[in-house]
Amino acid sequence: MSTTAIDFAVGADRPHGLMFGTCTLSFVILTAAMAGFLPIEFSILSVFLCAGPHNWVEARYFLSRLPARWGRLRSFFLLGFAGVLVLTASFAAMPLVLTLLHAETDAWMSSYAAWNTLLALWIAALVYLRSTQNPRRDWGWIWPAAFFVIALAWMWPMLWGLGLVYLHPLVALWILDREIRRTRPEVRRLYHLCLLAIPVCLALIWWRLAGAPNLVGDDLLTRITQHAGSELLTGVSSHCLVATHTFLEVVHYGVWLIAIPWLGKKSNLWNVPHMPLGRRSLTWTRGIQVFLLLSAAVVVLLWLCFAANYPITRDVYFTLALVHVLAEVPFLLRAL
């Protein structure tokens, strides 16, 4: 990255911009190095330390961005929250039901394809509602796009789900971009330049580990490699898959645990009474504070469960964590 490019990117706020760029690049490079050389160890440690806290910060962020009165957005948010609950509950219940019914492989594939269909239709409906509320947007293309995605989901149902695993961490980068534009626009160009380091780091990881032998080990190692897609992408080294997923996941954690809290100093993230919902009434303020306190207790409980039985807790966490994955959809669409 040239000095001229940096000067152009940081504009008038050069010292803060240079510090932001240096910290961002350092974090991405260090994360890639750790994921490339110690993928399993780094995956275990990062999930243990960051899984719960990053969900807590994300919940706090979403609460700070909710309007006090929904008004014409009422149908949009009702559909959004209903979809999050229904899709998460059905996804969590599906393996249990199919196992109890002793379902064949075809039934498993059809069930996941049906769930992917509901997901695509839910997102399309949210996009359509958002477009009707914003006349400047013409999003009529969403329905043919949704049916194209549904066709792909029925052709490769499990690969579609794996795509969500790898694409979800990148959504955090989009959310961070929106927040930077809102609170610190002077560093946004530099942030976009720093994002170029991510594909470079991914290319280096793939170059180094593409031919590495598969990871073979105990039950925990098997769960980690399966979550990275080793059973579906059989022609790719599981070592490379785990390193790739760990790198993206920790970058995702960094957004929520470092960047968003830093930007929160210029917003109402850390001030519940100043949140739109908090300004609604004292009851709402106290309710949000109690919710955040109980959520912090859940984070501590999650740490204890990880310490007691890491493999099972990891499985349960990544199933229930679908809530925050889906919740990002209506919030991103509302910001457009």
Image (cartoon, grey):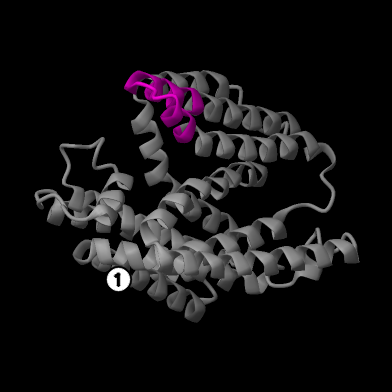
User: Which residue is more in the foreground, 275 or 238?
Assistant: 238
Q: How many marks?
A: 1
Question: The residue under label 1 is which amino acid type?
Answer: Leu
> In the rendered image, which quarter contains the N terminus?
bottom left
Does the image show residue 229? yes
User: Which residue is more in the foreground, 132 or 217?
Assistant: 217
Q: Secondary structure at mark 1?
A: helix
Q: Residue at x 30, y 71 (%)?
A: 30
Q: Residue at x 46, y 21 (%)?
A: 150
Residue 99 in the image: above or below residue 191: above
Residue 114 x, y percent position in the rendering: 49, 22
User: Which residue is more in the foreground, 50 or 28?
Assistant: 50
Residue 92 in the image: above or below residue 246: above
Could you tell whether 235 is left or right of 130 in the image? Answer: left
Within 10 Å of the Cα at label 1, are there few (<14), some (14-19), or many (20+) other Cα atoms? few
Residue 72 x, y percent position in the rendering: 82, 37
Q: Which residue is mark 1?
A: 30
Say if the magenta span includes residue 247.
no
**Magenta segment boundaries in residue numbering:** 95-115
Residue 196 x, y percent position in the rendering: 34, 57
Q: Residue at x 30, y 52 (%)?
A: 224
Residue 211 in the image: above or below residue 57: above
Residue 177 x, y percent position in the rendering: 53, 56
* Magenta span main SS: helix
Does the image show residue 28? no
Could you tell whether 95 is left or right of 242 in the image? Answer: right
Residue 203 in the image: above or below residue 40: above
User: Which residue is more in the foreground, 266 or 18?
Assistant: 266
Task: State the residue lying farthest toward the bottom.
Answer: 15
> In the rendered image, which quarter contains the C terminus?
top right
